[in-house]
Image (cartoon, rainbow, N blue to C red):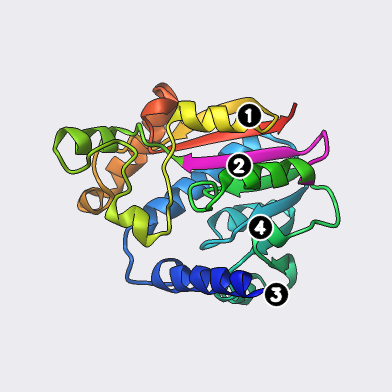
Amino acid sequence: MNMKAKLNQKKLDHIAQKYHLNKFVKDKYFDSKFQTIFAHWLLQNVKFQSVLEMGIGESNITKVLIRQRKKIDIVEGSKKLIENTKLKYKNKINFHHSLFEDFIPKKKYDLILATNILEHVKNPNLILKLLYKWCSKNTYVAITVPNSESIHRRLAVHMGLQKRQDSLSPRDLIVGHQRVYSSKKITKQIEKNNFRILKKAGFLLKILSNEQLLKFNNNLTDALYKISDDLSPELMADLAFIVKKK
């Protein structure tokens, strides 16, 4: 492993310790909620058995897929997150400790999960090009990104809290975001890298920041997720796409 890769993995371990493994970060509730709902949405829309999951986080999606007896491989750059997940699932998952850029899969998968990846990496086009190589013509890819056009970001601009909708908030910086996407921007990037979009959805009508939403009861949060199906994805906090190679 070269020095650059070691430094990048060290950075990922730092983010893992500061955010994913930090029990005092209360607003991780929203990540967990979104990822669990997204996993069930995925199961309703894609038939698959073998899965390559890019990054593990707090294993919210993994938990749902394991219950469905899916065969899961995970490529993860943070050794800390791998060790934490191994404690939960032992031999139920095949781990690859690697940066995405250095990973070479030995097989093709029914589904590749690139969930909340593209906003973190230095070169998202490079990741999409790698994904294209990893896919067979039958492989589905699921992509999720935070949405710069979300209601709470629009409100932040009008209130003078952000200069632009795609400005990075303090929370974005804590979790390692390098960008947020509009629907138009992520669609263009997906199609530019020779993928076709089969299905698109939005999750969570986010009207306030995570910190503010935590002050309300869970009934409101549940309703803000449920109402997402009735509204345009462009207004939601997170965008999701199911894609295949053109």
Q: Which quadrant is home to the N terminus?
A: bottom right
**Of 220 and 107, which appears nearest the observer?**
107
- Relative image position of residue 139 (x, y in whole percent): 77, 38
Q: Amino acid at mark 3?
A: Met
Q: Which residues are magenta?
A: 134-145
Give the residue pinned by disc 1: 192
Q: Is residue 88 visible?
A: no
Mark 4: few, some, or many residues within 10 Å (few <14, many ≥20)? some
Whether tag 1 and tag 2 are in contact, CB under 8 A, the answer is yes
Q: Is residue 18 above or below residue 69?
A: below
Asked which secondary structure carries label 1, the reply is helix
Query: In the rendered structure, which amino acid carries the disc numbered 4?
Result: Phe
Distance in Å between CA atoms under marks 3 and 2: 23 Å
Q: Earlier along the polypeptide chain: callout 3 or callout 2?
A: 3
Circle 4 residue: 100
| Lower position in the chain sequence, tag 3 or tag 1 | 3
Q: Earlier in the sequence, mark 1 or mark 4?
A: 4
Q: Residues within 10 Å of mark 3 (few under 14, many from 20)?
A: few
Name the side, left or right, on which 234 lies relative to 51. left
The CA span between labels 4 and 3 is 13 Å
Q: Is residue 140 magenta?
A: yes
Decide if residue 105 is on the left or right side of residue 77. right
Tell me how far mark 3 sits from mark 1, CA to CA.
31 Å
Instruction: Residue 73 in the image: state x and y as whole percent.
Output: 73, 59
For the point 50% across and 43% down, which residue is it? 37
Decide which of tag 2 and tag 4 comes sooner along the chain.
Answer: 4
The reply to whether callout 3 and callout 1 are in contact (CB within 8 Å) is no
Residue 125's label in the rendered image is 2
Residue marked by disc 3 = 1
